[in-house]
Image (cartoon, rainbow, N blue to C red):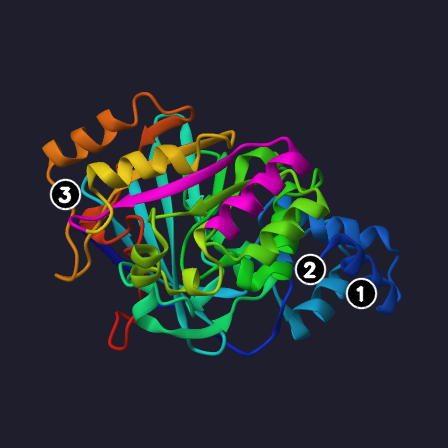
Amino acid sequence: MKLVSVNNERKSEKVPLTGMTRSKFEQMCVEYNEPDFRGRQLFHWIYAQRKRDIQEMDNLPKTFRDTLTRKYQVPSLELAKLDISPSRKTTKYLFKISTGEKIESVLMEDGGRITACLSTQVGCALGCTFCATAMMGFQKNLSVGEIVDQFLHLQNTSNHRINNVVFMGMGEPFLNYDRVIKAAELLIHPEGIHLGAGKITISTAGVVPKIIRFADEGWKFKLAVSLNGTTDQNRSEIMPINKKHSISDLISAAQYYYEKSNSFITFEYVLIENETDSIDDARRLRCLLKDLPCKVNVIPYNSFDDSYHRPDKNRITQFLSELKSASFTVTVRWSHGTEINAGCGQLSVMEGAAN
C-alpha cells in the first residue's frame, strides 16, 4: 500500500469556478464587460482542458485573467492524500472541502474500463448498518462544483481517459438530487467533459419518490438500486430506509421506471454472512424480480469492522447456483481496492483521519 500526502494550503477563500454552467460563465463575462464568448472559452478551459490556473487560459485577455484571479479560483476541493493499492489498479482520494469536512473518491482501472466513483454528500443520513459511510452520520450535501471537481482531480491524475462514472461513493445521491443531476449534466456536456449519458450510473438505496421523479424527467443516465434484502423485516434491520419505502414500493417504482424509460435497472445485492446469503434469500430474490427486466450485481461483502462478514466461497457459490434459472442477468462484482478500504461500502472519513 502506498500513501501519498499532499500538503496544499488554500491561499485564500475565493469563489470556485468549477460547477458553473456555460450560461453562468457567459452571464459572468457580460457582467465584467467582456463578450459572452469569453464564457464559452472559460467553460472549455475548465471542463475540456481541465486547467486549474486561470493565468494559463491564454486566449483570455490578461487584464480579464487578472480580474478573475483576484476573486475566483478553479478548484472546489483541496486534495489531501492519495492511497494507492498494491496492484496500482485502484486509487483512493481524500479531499478537503472549503468548510473543513473531508470526502473520499475512488479511481478504478479494470482493463480498458476506467471508472470514477464519486461522492455526493459528506457522510450519509440513511444509517445502513453494513456501510462505513453511515458511521459518519450526515454532515452536508456537496455542491455541484464539489461533485464535478472530484472527477477533474481523478482525470488529471490518471494516465487514461475516464470512461465510466458511478455515483456510488459517500452519501445517498437521491437525497442531493438536484445537484447530482446538474453535476451529471456537466459531465456529459459536448463542449466540456463529454461523457456519454449511458456511461454514468446514479445509485440509490431506494428513495422511491426520487426514482419516480428520475423516470418522469426522462434522464438517460443509468440507475442502480441497492436492494440487499428479500424480506421487509431483514432489509429494515440493515437498511432503515426500508421502514419508509418497503420492498414492494421499491419494486413498483422500479417497474414504473422501466415502463417510462425502457431501460434496465441494476439491483445491487450485497452478500453478508447470515444476513442476506441464504438459499431462501436467493429463491426470494429470484421471485421478487422475475417480472422486471433488470440486472443483478451480487457483491460479496467488504468488511470495515467486525460487525458483519463475507460468506465463504462455498456459500457464495451456492447462492449463485440458486440464481442460475433466474429470468434476469446475474453478475458477481468483486470490489477493487479493499486493501486500502476503497471497496463498496468501505468509504469513510472519521475524526482523526489523515489531514
The amino acid pointed to by label 1 is Met
Q: Which badge, 1 or 2, is on the more N-terminal residue?
A: 2
The quarter of the displayed image where residue 261 is located: top right
**Left or right: residue 251 compared with residue 58:** left
- Badge 3 crowding class, 10 Å Cα cut-off, few under 14, some 14 to 19, many 20 or more, is some
Q: Whole-Å distance between the Cαs marked 3 and 2?
A: 45 Å
x then y, percent, for residue 208: 55, 55
Q: Which badge, 3 or 2, is on the more N-terminal residue?
A: 2
x then y, percent, for residue 269: 34, 43
In the foreground, 245 or 124:
245
Q: Residue at x 17, y 30 (%)?
A: 318
Tags 1 and 2 in contact by the CB under 8 Å rule?
A: yes
Which residue position holds label 3? Answer: 311
Q: Residue at x 78, y 49 (%)?
A: 40
Indicate the secondary structure of the residue bearing disc 2.
loop
In the foreground, 206 or 231:
231
The quarter of the displayed image where residue 189 is located: top right
Residue 120 to residue 273: above or below = below
Which residue position holds label 2? Answer: 20
* Camera-side mark, 1 or 3: 3
* Camera-side mark, 1 or 2: 2
The quarter of the displayed image where residue 352 is located: bottom left
For the question of whether residue 155 can be seen, the reply is: yes
Residues drawn in magenta? 248-274
For the question of whether residue 88 can be seen, the reply is: no
Q: Whole-Å distance between the Cαs marked 1 and 2?
A: 10 Å
Which residue position holds label 1? Answer: 28
